[in-house]
Amino acid sequence: MSAIRKVRRLREAFRALDVDEKRGIITAYNERFLFIPTKLIHAIEDRLSESFGPATATSFEYEIGREGGVQYMRIAEKAGFKFRNFQDLSSVAERLGTLAGWGKVMVHEFDPEKKTVSMRWTDGVSVRNKRVNLPVCHFGRGILTGAMETVFGTACDSLEVKCQGKGDAYCEAIIGAPEEISRLANGLGS
Ligand SMILES: [Zn+2]
């Protein structure tokens, strides 16, 4: 994509943002948003992990994210975005991802027949300075999974196969029908 087109796209995304100083609220695409520090997300992650253990915390974050993803797509739908093909989906990912500050989200591969998608992103909110052994983007993966459930019209599962949190150059999640994902998970030996 040309630089000019890129700038125009981002400008369009941010034009959707409206700060109502009188009421103290932020809206975009007629929906209220909340501008919160990423440290608050980290505090939620840490608290969940301390209280319930890492496995349960991961699942909570993922499920909460998933609900968020459904909401994001509802907003996108109302705002007139379409999800018919790779290009449509890339545009939604880029605009909503950047607008909401989730990081640079890209659609890497999209297979509407098999109902699988590979999404890549950088600078995810859950990636911190300390290096860990397992993927950390449970909120983010949840959001993308919920979003893709809307697109595919079916329940989805997902796997974060690469994560900046463990030293990869970018994060990547494969999202699709649960049987596809468990086949993939078994193939990866995890
Ligand atoms: Zn990640």
Image: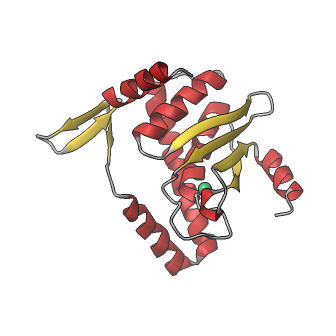
Picture residue at 55% right of the left edge, 51% below the top:
140
Q: Quadrant of residue 160?
A: bottom right
Q: Is residue 50 above or below residue 27?
A: below
Position of residue 79 in the picture relative to residue 183 (left or right): left
Q: Is residue 159 above or below residue 128?
A: above
Picture residue at 80% right of the left edge, 33% below the top:
114
Note whether residue 153 is visible: no
User: How many numbered marks, from 0 up?
Assistant: 0
Query: In terms of depth relative to the viewer, which is nearer, 38 or 57?
Result: 38
Picture residue at 65% right of the left edge, 61% below the top:
167
In the picture, the quarter occupied by the C terminus is bottom right
In x, y percent, where is residue 173? Answer: 68, 48
In the picture, the quarter occupied by the N terminus is top right
Position of residue 173 in the picture relative to residue 52 (left or right): right
In the displayed orientation, state which residue is furthest to the left.
22
Q: Quadrant of residue 133?
A: bottom right
In x, y percent, where is residue 142? Answer: 58, 51
